[in-house]
Image (cartoon, rainbow, N blue to C red):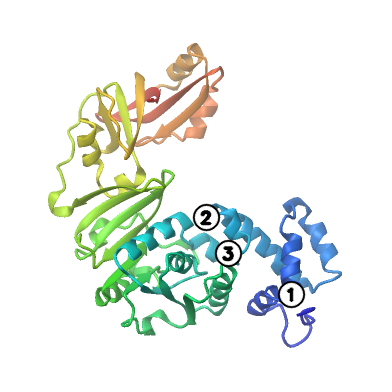
Amino acid sequence: MGRVNDPNTPSSLDDPLAAFAALLTEEGGALLDEVRDVDPAQELAAATRLRREHPAPLVSAALAQARLRQRAAAKFGAEDAARMFFTPNGVEQSTRSSVARYRAERFKAAGVRSVADLCCGIGGDALALARVGISVLAVDRDPLTCAVARANAEALGLAELIEVREADVTEVDTSTYDAVFVDPARRGGRGRIFDPEAYSPPLSWAVAAALKAPRAALKIAPGIPHEAVPTEAEAEWISDGGDVKEAVLWFGTDAPSSHRATLLPGGATLWTSLDAMPPDPEVRPVGRYLYEPDGAVIRAHLVAQVAEEVAGGLIDETIAYVTSDERHDTAYAAAYEITDQLPFNVKKLKALLREREVGILTVKKRGSAVEPEELRKKVKPQGKNAATVFMTRVAGAPTMLIGHPAP
């Protein structure tokens, strides 16, 4: 295509949409290849050099895209991220590819062949759906976001399965689709939005849209109040590598009014109907083993199931640590063997760690105001051995539990 227009022409690259379109030209693609591995420390020098040959806005857009691709590699994998296009909000708000793939596979297993992806963003979920063979209508009202989503479908060879439409999602007819997926915006000018009715669009609208479809999934913040979850929904909390990534409200499944915790990458799933939730575990003295339930299990209020699985109880009625005298295998909690239980006292902890030559110290906390890094600075671990310290409460009292991961 040759060189893009001069930035002083009416089609100025100062416009974000025009600058992005320029990245899709032959010149823009070559420039993206050239800046792919630019060291951030050398970015200014690279920009100065490249602006001698290319319009300054195009150089800035290419360098910004290179930075976004580097950030996106953690979510999308290095191979896909190197070919995709991003916006700052798109990188921040996109679903991690492993989670999007899991959700797409759930749709496919339910026999879904077409999905209306409302609030599609840069297309991360649409790409995952298309990769399992589902045709997608991807809708967003922002022109630049739609252009990026369309470019991503092209870049990954999925354009035949993904139609990108610039529109207000509240005005889109989804009646011809097997399922609806809604990912409302949960960030505003002041950061994260915690009130579901302040989402864009509001949760109430998304639920109404979901109830009209044969099947639906709504992506929501994992910290959503449980009382805000509709009784018609199956609520699923998903973690990946031990970190809680999101919650999803599923409609049209055979398990309404239930909670599920799913742990990726393995896919272990803990489920219960709300009518069959077991009572809270009893509080008991700290035994030989401490179990740290996965964050998705805690968010889903399924700690009682883990306690049953390991024949254990809680160390405190307000703390999600489970204790047991015996070692039990469970996919839903990490097990630690406890060697010491001490009242909270930094000096005593420091002396104990020094006596045992602990130089590799992992600090965990629940129910404690102590920050792990502050504690680490105070005890100054030194030595060849490793240990884990839990800053927590036991039967209401501030306590330190020392141990190590159980084999």
Q: What is the secondary structure assignment of the residue under circle 1? A: helix
Left or right of 346? Residue 59 is right
Q: Amino acid at mark 1?
A: Glu
Q: Residue 194, can we see it?
A: no
What residue is drawn where x is 57% and y is 77%?
A: 147
* Residue 46 on image: x %, y %: 81, 59
The spot of residue 237 in percent (x, y) is: 33, 53
Q: Residue at x 37, y 73 (%)?
A: 115
Q: Earlier in the sequence, mark 2 or mark 1?
A: 1
| Amino acid at dot 3 | Pro
Towards the viewer: 44 or 372 = 44
Q: In this orientation, which residue lies closer to the viewer: 356 or 138?
A: 138
Find disc 3 in the rendering and name its residue. Answer: 88
Mark 3 or mark 2: whose residue is earlier in sequence: 2
Q: Which residue is mark 1?
A: 26
Residue 240 visible in rendering = yes
- x, y (%) of residue 142? 52, 78
Disc 3/disc 2 C-alpha distance (Å)? 13 Å
Q: Which mark is residue 75?
A: 2
User: Counting residues from the N terminus, which is met first, the one under dot 3 or under dot 1?
Assistant: 1
Q: CA distance from mark 2 to mark 1?
A: 27 Å
Q: Residue furthest top?
A: 355
The mark lying in front, picked from 2 and 1, is 1
Residue at 45% x, 30% y is 363
Q: Does residue 42 lie above or below 231 as drawn?
A: above
Residue kind at label 2, given as amino acid type: Lys
